[in-house]
Amino acid sequence: MKAVDLLKALGVVVCVAVASSAYAQSSDAAATTSTESASPTKAQKSAVKKEDRKLGYSVRRALSKAQGFDVSKVYVRARSGAITLTGTVPEGGQIAQAEEVAKGVPGVKSVSNKITLGVQGGGQ
């Protein structure tokens, strides 16, 4: 009789273990699904990077077309419509000019101008 009771108890333990394991797996799946929907997919991230690259090129092209502006040492970075300008220019007026040109490009939401005045190279 004791062997039968032992088998019954063992059966209950196995059933509880299986049930809790199945519950834990379904909870993990639900957590993963909700996390995935909250974060952007790989395709979405790729599309955002592509748009950022395109906007950066547009700003750089606009700077290169600006009259009297030397774009050779200016770097443009775009992130979700926010433009960061870095590098150096030979004349102080070009710092403000770069910011104004960048603000005029469609898709630009903000401009962070970190351009500095560079030393003009030349021989004596």
Image (cartoon, rainbow, N blue to C red):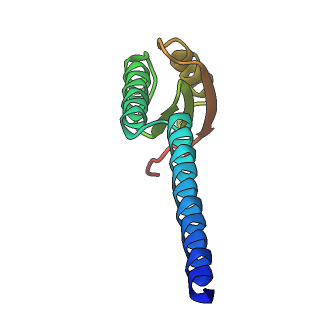
Left or right, residue 38 beside residue 55: right
Residue 5: x percent and y percent? 62, 80
Q: Quadrant of the N terminus?
A: bottom right
Out of 20 and 9, give the one closest to the viewer. Answer: 9
Residue 41: x percent and y percent? 43, 37
Left or right, residue 123 beside residue 104: left
* Among the 4 quarters of the image, the one containing residue 68: top left
Residue ranking furthest to the front: 1
- Is residue 37 visible in the rendered image? The answer is yes
The image shows residue 10, relative to residue 90, as above or below, that is below
The image shows residue 77, relative to residue 57, as above or below, that is below
Residue at (44% x, 23% y) in the render: 59
* Among the 4 quarters of the image, the one containing residue 46: top left
Residue at (41% x, 32% y) in the render: 44
- Is residue 87 visible in the rendered image? The answer is no
Residue at (52% x, 57% y) in the render: 22
Left or right, residue 18 beside residue 48: right
Out of 79 and 85, give the one closest to the viewer. Answer: 79
* Among the 4 quarters of the image, the one containing residue 10: bottom right
Residue at (54% x, 44% y) in the render: 30
Residue 113: x percent and y percent? 62, 31
Out of 59 and 115, give the one closest to the viewer. Answer: 59
Residue ranking furthest to the bottom: 2
Q: State how many labels appear.
A: 0
